[in-house]
Image (spheres, rainbow, N blue to C red):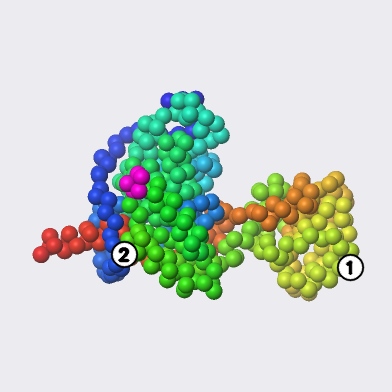
Amino acid sequence: MSTLSSAILRVKGSVRQHCSRCQVILGPRHYHVSRTSLESMDEISSDPSPIYVAATRQHVGKTTVSLALMSGLQKRVDRVGFIKPVGQKSLKVVDENGLEMRVDKDVVLVKEHFKLDYISYRYMSPVLIPPGYTRAFVDGNVTSTSQKDVIMEHFQEVNSRSSIVLAEGTGHCAVGSIIGASNAEVASWIGAKMVLVANGGLGKAFDELELNRVICEHFNVPIAGVIINKVQNDKYDQTKHYLEKALHDFWGVPLIGCIPDRPFLGCPALVDLERNLNGSFISGQEHALRHYAVSDLNLVATSLTVFLEQLRSRPSRTLYVCHASRNDILLGFLGEHQRRKNRGERLEAALIVCEGHELDPHLVDMLALNNDPAILVVPQPTSLVMEKIHSFTPKLHSGDSSRVTATVNHYEPYIDFDLLLQQAGYQQRLEEHDIAAH
């Protein structure tokens, strides 16, 4: 295909013939699907429309919503499949046959967390976009046909092993347009119905949704519904009421979910900061998955006495930043940790040390012997570190199971899964089954 053909993982073999589907959006009425009906869906409906999740822009919680959808669907439907047709950031994995490959990082998260043992990694991430891929496409070294072929082959494999397929897009509906594989276009290839995810609000959220609706309409992709994320708690009822009404009146599609904001889910763990700041632990690496609120971030530019007063008066889980020249702060932090340890207490604060010169080797040895307080060393100056932490948006990953679980537990109750399944075609097939039975 091209010099970048290795970036696309292709599998040859028997492929189930793709079935065209009648892409009909059901109206905004909320039909009730009984639990008994849902439990027997696999026998009745073997090929519903795939559900394709796309965002209106970056950082609105598309992956978070996808996790909640996977969890809720697994409780209602046997063998929920997952695919990320076009990915960007990838991880190296080994499949069940011992073959090493790279797949999108969200594929790893979903497959491992939900134990999708019935689907191989090799089918879940058809196209990856490494550096230089876009230029290769524009130069004609990668073709639209080759991309579509591999996506369709892999989708059919996932579909043949699943009762329903959840596809996660990359960004908003137009992402991928320059390589002829936007989310909307890919959704049209696999016959999917789109779920759009936007952040809370009213006017701005609807404006962003409208832009994406137009792209879906261009590619004849039906919109199954909308999920609004990170809604301010004090405006939850208002936002839900008016967006539900606007979507009904203007689009004729339902609001499938409305998720109130929970700030903890946006708090980075130390391992997130380690990666983002290119840092390394000199002590306390076992606390790498501890989360910290950015609002409690403190730059230490005071005397040791004032720092110790703050350390004892602020919440235990507070994140501090200091310069590498402040040996007094490092010693004070270590001393306070030991003092609390002797009293049977825990100091959950963490210290990020910004290097301007080499740390005192004796102090490093002392910290290595203790190896308990969370201390991270980063190569950037304090001002840049503070800026990066404040602007950082943590992403979910397979190693942070506590946050993934907390995310799913928070989101899932606010999503109408019966309505989503109805929109994916289950209701229509149930009705057809009932008519045939009579």
- Check residue 305 in the rendering and tell me which mark sits there, or answer none: 1
Nearer to me, 193 or 377? 193
Q: Quadrant of residue 196?
A: bottom left
Few, some or many residues within 10 Å of mark 2 (<14, 14–19, 20+)? many
Question: Mark 2 — residue?
Answer: 28
Q: Position of residue 292 (x, y in %)?
A: 67, 62
Assess whether mark 1 and mark 2 are in contact (beta carbons under 8 angstroms): no
Amino acid type shown at disc 2: Pro
Q: Residue at x 34, y 39 (%)?
A: 152
Assign the N terminus to one quadrant of the image. top left
Residue 207 located left or right of residue 309: left
Q: Residue at x 75, y 73 (%)?
A: 344
For marks 2 and 1, the one nearer the N-term is: 2
Nearer to me, 262 or 166? 262
Q: Secondary structure at mark 1?
A: helix
Q: Residue at x 85, y 49 (%)?
A: 359
Boundaries of the magenta span: 217-221
Q: Secondary structure at mark 2?
A: loop
Is 94 situated above or below 310?
above
- Check residue 188 in the rendering and tell me which mark sits there, or answer none: none
Is 187 situated above or below 179?
below
Residue 433 located left or right of residue 130: left
Nearer to me, 343 or 235? 235
Q: Position of residue 207 (x, y in %)?
A: 47, 56
Few, some or many residues within 10 Å of mark 1 (<14, 14–19, 20+)? few
Q: Position of residue 289 (x, y in %)?
A: 63, 58
Examine the rendering and report whether any part of residue 344 can be seen: yes
Residue 99 located left or right of residue 225: right
- Nearest-to-viewer mark from 2 and 1: 2
Q: Position of residue 355 (x, y in %)?
A: 81, 48
C-alpha separation, residue under disc 2 versus residue under disc 1: 63 Å
